[in-house]
Image (tube, helix red, strand yellow):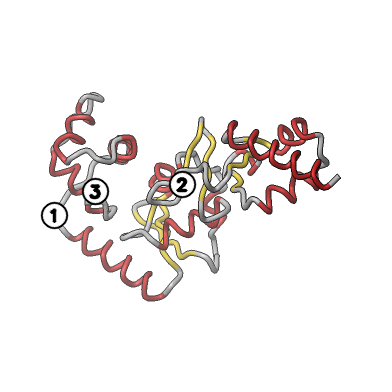
Amino acid sequence: MRLLNISKEKSLLNFFKKKQVVTIQSLMEFSQLSLNSVKRRLSSWKAYSSYDYNRSYYVLPEVAKFNCNGIWENHGVYFSQHGTLKQTIVYLVNNSELGLARCELEVLLGITLDKVFPSYFKDSFLLNRELENGRYIYFSKEPEVYLEQTQKRKKFQRSQAKLPRDENAIIILVELIKHPTDTLVQLTKRVRRRGITITIDKVRNLLQYHGLF
């Protein structure tokens, strides 16, 4: 009986690796194991659950290829080394140079945040938020990090450097994510091919603004 269990678990693990991303239901159907049995195996394998699709997809640690922000995407399903969507947002904000706006978080996360997102961190012990030009900017709750982020943000705003419009900034950041090895010139040309008239200085300013250059 013990050998049978080991064989079944090995077969299930191989199935999981081959599929890369699976649901609990697909694992149950393949293995004919109960829900609790599959959950125990996912826990023992330290599988990651997706932070979108109601955390219904799973991936093995050795399969996921996380980027520098600890995020991995597979066919439109997103996973994070940092846990849930809320935990991932807190990590991204805490590790940002100047805090992050909702649209900037959406670019980094690869998903559109829910309309109720602003209420997630209202009066929260996880993040600070401040209203800036009609939109909320999220900052670290750690006093030293918060002070550094807000000081850098104010310094940048006082500078004469001008940033692209929000919709163009999103396109630039998306192109950077797709082509992380691009030089500043290559990235600017790539954005211009999208029909956007923009100077290399504005692209540089945006990357500096986010601590990416």
Residue indicated by mark 3: 207
Please identify, in this view, whether the residue under mark 3 or under mark 2 is nearer the observer: 2
Q: Position of residue 108 (x, y in %)?
A: 41, 45
The answer to which quarter of the image holds residue 5 is top right
Instruction: Report the residue at 65% width, 33% height from top.
Output: 15
Cα gap from disc 3 to disc 1, whole angstroms: 15 Å
Residue closest to the far front: 3
Cα gap from disc 1 to disc 2, whole angstroms: 33 Å
Please identify, in this view, whether the residue under mark 1 or under mark 2 is nearer the observer: 2
Residue 26 higher or lower than 113, as above or below: above
Upstream in the sequence, badge 3 or badge 2?
2
Q: Callout 1 environment at 10 Å: few (<14), some (14 to 19), or many (20+)?
A: few
Instruction: Report the residue at 50% width, 54% height from top.
Output: 88
Type of the residue with mark 2: Ile
Residue indicated by mark 2: 71
The one nearer the camera, 9 or 173, is: 9
Residue 2 higher or lower than 150, as above or below: above
Type of the residue with mark 3: Leu
Q: Callout 3 environment at 10 Å: few (<14), some (14 to 19), or many (20+)?
A: some
The answer to which quarter of the image holds residue 38 is top right
Instruction: Report the residue at 37% width, 50% height from top.
Output: 68
- Residue 156 placement, left or right of 21: left
- Residue 147 placement, left or right of 60: left
Please identify, in this view, whether the residue under mark 3 or under mark 1 is nearer the observer: 3
Instruction: Report the residue at 14% width, 37% height from top.
Output: 185
Element assignment for label 1: loop
Q: Are marks 3 and 1 in contact (CB under 8 Å)?
A: no
The one nearer the camera, 17 or 36, is: 17
Type of the residue with mark 1: Gln
Q: Position of residue 147 (x, y in %)?
A: 34, 72
Residue indicated by mark 1: 160
Element assignment for label 2: strand
